[in-house]
Amino acid sequence: MEMKIPNPALEEEIRNVFANDSGGHDEAHIFRVVRMALRLCETQGGDRQIVYLAALLHDLDDPKRTGGRDGETALARALMQKYGYGAPTVQKVCAIIEKLSFKGQGRDVPETLEGKIVQDADRLDAIGAIGVARAFAYGGSRGRKMYDPDEPPAVGLSPEEYRRRKGSTVNHFYEKLLLVKDLMHTDAARRIAEKRHRETEAFLKAFLEEWEGKA
Ligand code: ADP
Ligand code: NI
């Protein structure tokens, strides 16, 4: 018998793993993605158990955290096995996690509805007020400048170039934040993304006006 959602012991493990991250992949991000993904399920359908696990475990094997390679799922797999989830569940969740990350072009798309829902939820957290805050938190944690007018943004980077970018956080808006609205899979997420996109654009406009002394 597989454990139903929520799974408090598993959540506690995740909380401990992400507790000390301040660079945008903190514990609060994980649980916002879990809540958003389950909210999307209400109108979009999908297997809530799969959505819950994929959202909860989606950043555990992230190379930015582990120093490992893209698309790995070893830690997520081991944790699900520890909590007694069966092989079909583990397989479905890992297939989602492998395809989730943006990596410069946003080209990887999970095949299942559950995967699309979790990818939408993860990307929604990268835009709007919280997305803006996460970008500057991440940039700060890597010692990046907020903005450098002499350095133009580059769009459509290869995964390697995207990871190696040392550019300003404002450039990251053009390289990711302003692109994700058009990459949503579900109608429910698209509606939320449109509002958050407008907020992201409004922030950027105000930032640049203030920078140039025009506002
Ligand atoms: P994914 O988890 O889909 O691969 P990223 O790892 O690119 O996405 O981003 C995770 C979080 O860190 C997001 O909030 C993103 O906007 C932020 N982030 C990633 N790279 C940068 C960067 N170069 N500058 C500022 N924020 C970044
Ligand atoms: Ni994430």
Image (cartoon, helix red, strand yellow):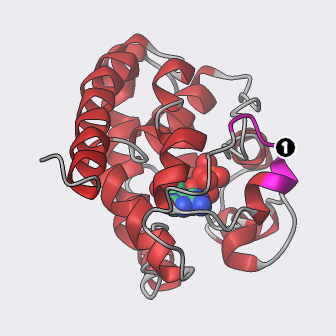
| Residue 3 position within the rendered picture, expressed as x and y whole percent measured from the top left | 50, 55
* Residue located at (49% from left, 70% from top): 139
Quick check: 198 left or right of 68? Answer: left
184 part of magenta stretch: no
| Quarter occupied by residue 144 | bottom right
Q: Is residue 141 above or below residue 102?
A: below
Residue type for callout 1:
Ser
At horizontal 75% and vertical 60% (from top left) the residue drawn is: 163
Residue 133 visible to the viewer? yes
Report the residue at 52% width, 19% height from top: 182
Query: Which quadrant holds residue 127?
Result: top left
Residue 10, placed above or below residue 21: above
From the image, tell me which residue sits under label 1: 158
Label 1: element kind: loop
Image spot of residue 16 (x, y percent): 46, 85
In this view, 117 is above or below 162: above
- Which residue is situated farthest in the left direction here? 215
Q: Nearer the viewer, residue 4 or 167?
A: 167
Q: In the picture provided, is 46 more to the left or to the right than 98?
A: left
Stretch in magenta = 155-161
Q: Nearer the viewer, residue 207 or 48?
A: 207
Q: Quadrant of residue 128?
A: top left
Residue 23, visible in the rendered structure: no
Q: Is residue 157 magenta?
A: yes
For the point 67% across and 62% down, the residue is: 80
- Along the horizontal axis of the image, is 34 left or right of 115? left
